[in-house]
């Protein structure tokens, strides 16, 4: 019984780290812009990995061990990120400057999977129409785009 529960804990930790890496690799833009298709995909992934973590067993002790493992690994990652700035940069990422003084860095935008439509939507949120009106636009680590206009509108 104990060995089986240790296997569940190990599988749960591995699946969590695998999912964490997958989200990091697919790009942060998706974090801020979840749509119905993304929600459906998230639900399907949750269902798929549940069996991988619990070996298809649905009893209380298996679920409790799996949930506790996920919480402990999550807590450990949070503590690591608080203590190690290099780990935070690696795992969470850093803000990326997409526009500086009206000039779009399309190489970085492409790398981060940010489209012209994404930038235009961020401009509209600040009552701006084009990149030349932007002093600074930054893709934040949470996937949102921060915009600082060249001239502040009142």
Image: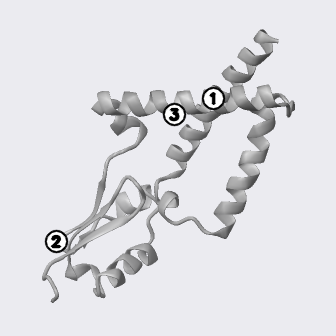
| Residue depicted at x 74% and y 23% | 8
Measured in 3D between alpha carbons, the distance from the residue under mark 1 to the one under mark 3, in whole angstroms, is 10 Å
Asked if 129 appears above or below 33 in the picture, the reply is below
| Residue at which label 1 appears | 68
Tell me: 151 left or right of 27: left
The residue positioned 36% from the left and 59% from the top of the image is 107
Q: Nearer the viewer, residue 99 or 146?
A: 146
Residue at the image point whose x is 54% and y is 28% from the top = 73
Helix, strand or loop under label 2:
loop
Element type where label 1 sits in the image = helix
Which of the two discs, 1 and 2, labels the residue nearer the N terminus?
1
Camera-near label (1 vs 3) is 1
Q: Quadrant of residue 136?
A: bottom left
Which residue is painted at 51% across and 66% down in the image? Answer: 33
Q: Residues within 10 Å of mark 3 (few under 14, many from 20)?
A: some
Q: Position of residue 59 (x, y in %)?
A: 85, 31
User: Image quadrant for the C terminus?
Assistant: bottom left
Horizontal and vertical percent position of residue 80: 38, 27
Judge depth for marks 1 and 2 and give the one in front.
1
The span from disc 1 to disc 2 (Cα, nearest Å) is: 48 Å
Task: Give neighbour class at mark 2: few <14, some 14-19, many 20+ (Cα, 10 Å).
Answer: some
Q: Is residue 103 left or right of residue 112?
A: left
Q: Which residue is mark 2?
A: 101
Direction front: furthest residue:
60
Residue holding disc 3: 74
Quadrant assignment, res 87: top left
Between the residue at mark 2 and the residue at mark 3, the CA separation in whole angstroms equals 39 Å
Q: Position of residue 6 (x, y in %)?
A: 71, 15
Q: Which of the pair 8/122 is nearer the observer?
A: 8
User: In the rendered image, which quarter is residue 15 located in?
Assistant: top right
Residue 94, label in figure: none
């Amino acid at each position: 019984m104990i060995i089986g529960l240790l296997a569940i804990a190990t599988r749960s930790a591995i699946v969590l780290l695998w999912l964490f890496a997958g989200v990091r690799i697919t790009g942060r833009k998706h974090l801020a812009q979840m749509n119905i298709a993304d929600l459906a995909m998230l639900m399907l992934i949750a269902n798929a990995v549940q069996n991988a973590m619990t070996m298809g067993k649905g009893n209380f002790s298996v679920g409790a061990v799996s949930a506790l493992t996920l919480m402990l690994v999550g807590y450990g990652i949070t503590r690591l990120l608080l203590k190690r700035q290099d780990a935070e940069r690696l795992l969470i990422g850093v803000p990326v400057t997409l526009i500086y003084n009206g000039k779009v860095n399309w190489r970085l935008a492409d790398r981060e999977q940010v489209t012209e439509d994404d930038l235009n939507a961020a401009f509209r949120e600040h009552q701006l129409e084009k990149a030349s009106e932007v002093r600074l636009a930054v893709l934040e680590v949470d996937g949102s785009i921060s915009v600082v206009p060249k001239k502040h509108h009142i």
